[in-house]
Image (cartoon, rainbow, N blue to C red):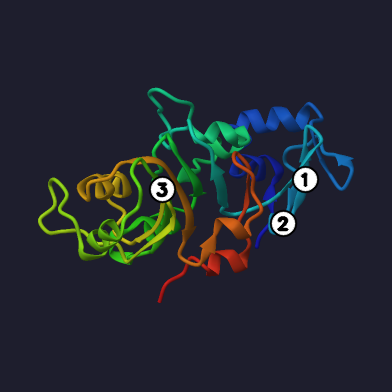
């Protein structure tokens, strides 16, 4: 990878416009290996570069792949209407580098949410043609019955759908909790399927996408981190 000037590196990492990044550098707010860099034209190899902005350490990443344990009360839209955006849970530079959610969770749905600034990754993960299985735990208003499980596995008719939609897996996990694995990713799908089957969803959490399990990530609600290379492999499908 060829060298880039420090202002270009900072801009690519979401620290502002080119002029804003030059101002940061000239004001002495950027350092590398403990040395304050004040000349924005200074060049570095970006790959693997570790730098500090306002004494906070960052590593250069050409693209970012993030995972969040989404809490309730946040919208996945960049222009939220009634609740804060999930991006407010991240450092501001993530918004500057145009990080987007991979699909959406309702404001009151919790759990596993992916975000990235890699358009190809977002498209691949979001495409209905990819049939990426997603696992949810739903808390129901009424008790989970054998008939409810059977109906969800057989398929229920949703409004505006041409054919019944079935869950790949439906398991009763508690008196008022059911695990459902879906691959279609339709609007409000879990809630609509439960309603069509004669029950009501009172709480919902996504606990797995592909082979990536929320339980393995050790993230409290509202916490996020970068996905590792091995974790990204868990999201791939043949």
Name which quarter of the figure residue 163 lies in: bottom left
Give the residue pinned by disc 3: 176
In the displayed structure, 213 sits above or below 224; it is below
Instruction: Find numbered disc 2 in the image and state the secondary structure of the residue it sits on.
Output: loop
To which quarter of the image does residue 56 belong? top right
Circle 2 Cα neighbour tier, 10 Å, few/some/many (<14 / 14–19 / ≥20) = some
- Cα separation, mark 3 vs mark 2, equals 55 Å
Query: Quadrant location of residue 237?
Result: bottom left
Q: Which residue is outermost to the bottom?
A: 238
Who's the residue at 35% across and 40% down the image?
141
Q: Mark 3 or 1, which is nearer the eye?
A: 3
Instruction: Please name the residue shown 65% across and 63% down the image.
Output: 1
Image position of 28 (left or right of 10)? right
Q: Residues within 10 Å of mark 1 (few under 14, many from 20)?
A: some
Residue wearing tag 1 = 51
- The nearer-to-camera label among 3 and 2 is 3
The residue under label 2 is 45
Q: Nearer the viewer, residue 215 or 141?
A: 141
Q: Residue at x 63, y 35 (%)?
A: 91
Say left or right for 5 vs 164.
Answer: right
Q: CA distance from mark 3 to mark 1?
A: 49 Å
Q: Is residue 75 above or below residue 114?
A: above
Residue 116 visible, this angle: no
Instruction: Mark 3 or mark 1: name the one nearer the start of the chain.
Output: 1
Q: In the image, is residue 110 above or below residue 127?
A: above
């Amino acid at each position: 990878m060829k060298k880039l000037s420090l202002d270009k590196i900072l801009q690519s990492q979401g620290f502002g416009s080119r002029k804003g990044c030059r101002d940061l550098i000239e004001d002495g707010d950027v350092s590398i290996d403990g040395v304050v860099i004040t000349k924005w034209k200074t060049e570095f190899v970006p790959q693997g570069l570790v730098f500090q902005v306002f004494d906070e350490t960052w590593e250069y990443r050409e693209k970012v792949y993030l995972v969040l344990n989404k809490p309730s009360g946040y919208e996945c839209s960049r222009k939220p209407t009634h609740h804060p955006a999930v991006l407010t849970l991240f450092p501001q530079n993530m918004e500057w580098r145009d990080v987007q959610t991979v699909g959406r969770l309702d404001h009151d749905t919790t759990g596993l949410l992916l975000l990235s600034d890699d358009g190809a990754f977002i498209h691949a993960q979001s495409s209905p043609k990819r049939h990426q299985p997603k696992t949810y735990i739903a808390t129901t208003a009424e008790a989970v019955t054998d008939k409810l499980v059977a109906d969800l596995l057989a398929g229920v008719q949703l409004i505006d759908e041409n054919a019944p939609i079935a869950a790949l897996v439906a398991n009763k996990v508690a008196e008022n909790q059911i695990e459902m694995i879906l691959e279609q990713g339709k609007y409000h799908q879990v809630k609509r399927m439960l309603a069509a089957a004669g029950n009501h969803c009172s709480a919902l959490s996504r606990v797995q996408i592909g082979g990536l399990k929320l339980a393995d990530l050790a993230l409290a609600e509202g916490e996020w981190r970068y996905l590792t290379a091995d974790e990204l492999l868990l999201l791939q499908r043949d």
